Amino acid sequence: MKNVNTWVREHQLTSYFVLSYLLTWALWAPSLASARGLLPWQLPAYLSLAGNFGPALAAVLVAWVVDGGVGVKALLDRLMQWRVKSAWYIVALIPLGVNILLIAIFSSLSGLSPELGLRTWLTLVPTMLFWLIMGGPLTEEIGWRGFALPRLQENRSALSASLILALAWVGWHLPRYLDPSQAVGGLAAILAFALQATILCILFTWVYNNTAGSLLLPVLFHGAINTLGYLLPMLFPAAATNPDLGGHWVLVNLLLLGILAVWAAAVVIVNGPSTLSRKEMRDEETAA
């Protein structure tokens, strides 16, 4: 056991990524097998949500091996690091505003009006909180940004660290495309996701580095980005069963990808690839 702990301490990133993959894929496997008809019974899709906690759980376990309870506390404390400039809360919620605009565009293109009845409003906040906790923002950011990113940036530029993390993030997601319901679009969908993940990793690093390593802001940013994926089906339930509207859905997602790409390019140009952060923030980090 001592040899294992020593190896983990000496290879923290490798240990983290391997453990993230193993934990997540093991928890996803039953639902994926069920979706492909490989089991004699049908499992509900929500059982796979436990696998989303793989990156967070791996980060906690490796932090425990490396630094014990102190390391775990230091990692989780950054979720409560809310004392940042108020402008960064606005930045974190910009994707929500963009997604609302895209929903309006979808409504205009499809000719459908969003369902904004009492039932929708009563389920809106619980749905947003559910996906904030279970759908990736909280379950992933503790690991990707909380554990991996600072270690990747120790001897690399912020841009290089972001690209490496994007590769790991895409690889972590790949088993999802073994589910027939997730595999719509085939290789093109996978490549589009890989491009989006790369762009988002740059933006996540930018938010993380400019808020002195706060995890709360990346969690909010991630949650705001994800809203399009569940708000559209919630507001336009008829669209889910209408194949004629598939083109509008693709167009809306391409618009989102384009907006994010321009945003990420501007971040790199304005802030520089070395740190992806403002000069005053770099000075503060140097002083610290």
Image (cartoon, grey):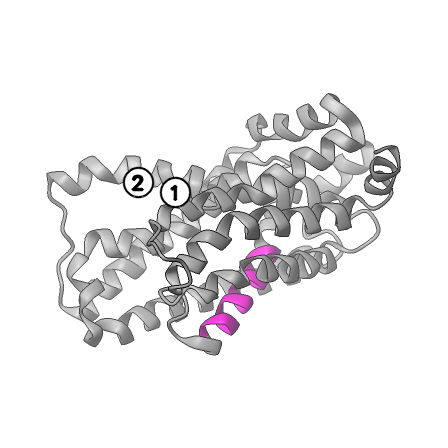
Q: Amino acid at mark 2?
A: Thr
Give the residues drawn in magenta, as a range: 189-202
Q: How far from the left and from the top, in percent, is residue 252? A: 33, 67
Q: Residue furthest front?
A: 40
Disc 2 crowd rating (10 Å Cα; few below 14, some 14-19, many 20+) is some
- Residue 91 seen in render: no
Residue at x 19%, y 39% (from the top left corner): 121
Locate residue 72: give its quadrant.
top right
Element marked by disc 2: helix
Residue at x 35%, y 50% (from the top left corner): 43
Residue contact at pointers 2 and 1, CB within 8 angstroms = yes
Q: How far from the left and from the top, in percent, is residue 171? A: 60, 62
- Residue 193 seen in render: yes
Q: Mark 1 = which residue? A: 131
Left or right: 36, with 85 as reference point: left
- Position above or below: 84 against 243: above
- Position above or below: 26 against 134: below
The reply to whether the magenta stretch includes residue 224 is no
Locate residue 194: give its quadrant.
bottom right
Q: How far from the left and from the top, in percent, is residue 209? A: 66, 44
Locate residue 183: give its quadrant.
bottom left
Residue at x 11%, y 38% (from the top left corner): 118
Residue at x 22%, y 38% (from the top left corner): 123
Element marked by disc 1: helix
Tell me the CA gap for discs 2 and 1. 6 Å
Q: Mark 2 = which residue? A: 127
- Position above or below: 272 against 87: below
- Position above or below: 82 against 183: above
Q: Main secondary structure of the magenta part?
A: helix
Q: Nearer the viewer, residue 272 or 136?
A: 136
